[in-house]
Image: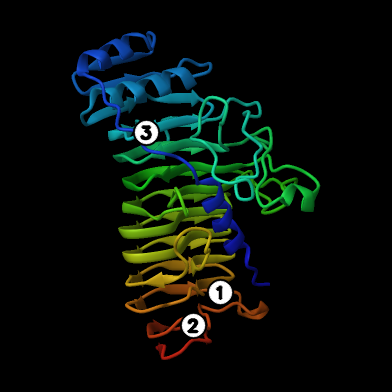
Amino acid sequence: MRTHLGIIMVLFSVACGSGMTESSNFASSGSSDLRVASCGSSVSRNADVIQVRPTGADDTGNLQCAIDAAVASGRSTSIRLAAGTFHTAQIVAKNFVGQIAGSGTAATVITTLGTPMFVTRDDFFSHGLPTPPGGNNPWPSLIAFIGGDFTMSDLTIQVFDPTPTTGWTIFGLDQVFGRLFQTLAHEIVIVGLSAHAVFERIKLVGMNTPTDPLFGNNVYNAVIFVGEGSGPAPITGRFEVRDSAFVEVAAGAVAVNVQDATVAIAGNTSQRTSNPVQIADLDRTAVTVAANRFQDGSAGIQILDACGGALCGFSNTQLLVVGNRLAEFDGIEITATFASGVSCAVLGNDIHYDADNGGVAVLLGPATKDCLVVTKGAVKDEGTGNRVIKIP
């Protein structure tokens, strides 16, 4: 049966992604060198390259120290993560510029500490915007980027703890379910007023957790690009996820409350992930979702309204969904509200869907309009002026 869990998931994303503020307090390169020297023997620096090796114990301090040293340098820096497994609690990167690269998805692994991470349990949505993460306000996010211009590549992030956090809530849902959520809200979250974030060859892994009351996963969002701030304000910039994999998480690549940006999600795969792509609430943004291979979920690609920030629905946005291979309950669900200036094309996708239980290749909701769909499968068109071309 088709559900609206995607709407709830992106609302979780907006609420938990609110309140981070950007910082541009760069120090001199000398100060940066001193920072690296204070990190310990597993962190070293050679010019603009910082190398980090796993210790076999808690690597949180070394990873955070390397990022802080890179930011303090005030210039583009490459952080190289050696082969092995890094165990960490929450990491925060404010205005990081450069690259974080592992030694390959089969070689470099980032994972949790194996015990529930302490997180603030505040109701993010109902109690107003929280202070930035860290210190006494740790978020249910493993890695948080605040602004910046960076690439992250060639590593795996995996969370195999059934209860990776001590518990948190939003919307007062702890009262509805009679318990806190002990999941990770995000493996990676990117917030701020502007960011340029590219992810290549990243494997993002969670696990099915029947004890989770909402989605049955221990990770809700693998990687999310989300507007925050007063309103919360939209985020601008660039968000790309390429040649990566989502395994057993509730949502894969997510972009919400985005303005004046480009979004490209291409060449990725998924396994047992309910919604590998979710995109909501865009203005003046170009979106391409192409050449992905998704299977075993609810809907491979969801384009929808969340309305948890300054934006609600789509305006002045170009949406292209092309060349994807999908084997899901529904292939593509476009239920967003299309205002003026929206162009939409769904072309060349190979879609296998659950027709026996009411699934369709493409669903066009009642607030869509002027969308071109060329497909072999069944299309449910509830919109206005959409053009559907069925091919044999």
Residue lying at 32% horizontally and 72% vertically, measured from the top left? 316
- Give the distance between the C-alpha atoms of the residues marked 1 and 2, in whole angstroms: 8 Å
Q: In what quadrant of the picture does the N terminus appear?
A: bottom right
* Residue toward you, 126 or 174: 126
* Near-viewer residue (181 or 79): 181
Q: Secondary structure at mark 1?
A: loop
The mark closer to the camera, 3 or 2, is: 3
Residue at mark 3 to residue at mark 1: CA–CA distance: 42 Å
- SS at badge 3: strand
Between disc 3 and disc 1, the foreground one is: 3
Cβ atoms under marks 1 and 2 closer than 8 Å = yes
Kindly identify the residue that appears in the image at 22 percent across and 31 percent down: 76
Quick one: label 1 or label 2, which is nearer the N terminus? 1
Q: In the displayed structure, would residue 233 be above or below residue 60?
A: below
Marker disc for residue 94: 3
> Which residue carries the number 2 mark?
377
Q: Position of residue 84 (x, y in %)?
A: 44, 24
